[in-house]
Image: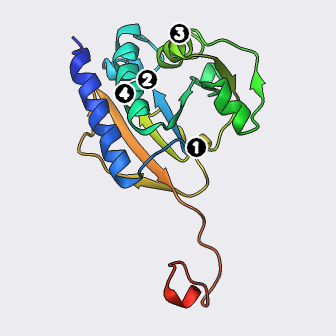
Amino acid sequence: MAVNVREIEDQLYTVLQDLNKAMPLSKEHILIIGASTSEVAGEHIGSNGSREIATAMYRALIQFKQETDVELAFQCCEHLNRALVVESATARSRGIEPVSVIPVRQAGGAMATHAFSKMEKPVLVEAIRADAGIDIGDTFIGMHLKEVAVPIRSQVKTIGSAHVTLAKTRPKLIGGIRASYDRTEEHE
């Protein structure tokens, strides 16, 4: 399948805008990205990673980061136990210990490998509790989202040939019959 990288970049940017409408993201938030460039190209996940596709998706993600200041976390593939590429400042500010590994296309995936090569001071961490996420190609990002994930619908259902799923998170609703969840004048 011939891949139009400009179309992929545009599709991802639209997905990011839809997510941001549902949950305005800022420097206080972490956005996890799980992406199979193989799936985007119409291949089986993990079979044919593409630097060209990763580069196009990274451009859209960096543009979004510049607009929102959100922190990005790129999920590696199963061969690195779905570790995450983040800026060292992100890991440090959240008290997350880095691990010693460098992603490569065959163990980490094309997207995480490209992100690692482009970030200012990248490190890998084993786990993170992200506020929102984008799963491109059914990479299963749920293990890195905060506990209450809420699906978001986008006008874009696929990027290239890959299925896209979005999620935001919210705090747990706790309490019982007397609990209140909306702030009113009564709470003042």
Give the answer, above or below, for where 50 lies relative to 36: above
Disc 2: CA contacts within 10 A as few (<14), some (14-19) or many (>=20)? many
Q: Position of residue 82 (x, y in %)?
A: 62, 28
Left or right: 85 in relation to 17: right
Q: Position of residue 149 (x, y in %)?
A: 52, 54
Residue ID for mark 4: 63
Q: CA distance from mark 3 to mark 2?
A: 11 Å
Q: Nearer the viewer, residue 151 or 185?
A: 185
Amino acid type shown at disc 1: Ala
Q: CA distance from mark 3 to mark 1?
A: 24 Å
Q: CA distance from mark 2 to mark 1?
A: 19 Å
Give the answer, above or below, for where 69 lies relative to 122: below
* First along the sequence among labels 3 and 4: 4
Residue at the image point whose x is 61% and y is 41% from the top: 144
- Residue 159, by quadrant, is top left
- Which mark is in front, 3 or 1? 1
**Which type of secondary structure does the marked residue at label 2 adopt?**
loop
Left or right: 30 in relation to 19: right
Residue ID for mark 1: 130
Amino acid type shown at disc 3: Arg
* First along the sequence among labels 1 and 4: 4
Q: Is residue 44 visible?
A: no
Left or right: 184 in relation to 87: left
Q: Quadrant of the C terminus?
A: bottom right
**Which type of secondary structure does the marked residue at label 3 adopt?**
loop
Residue ID for mark 2: 36
Residue ID for mark 3: 105
Q: CA distance from mark 2 to mark 4?
A: 20 Å
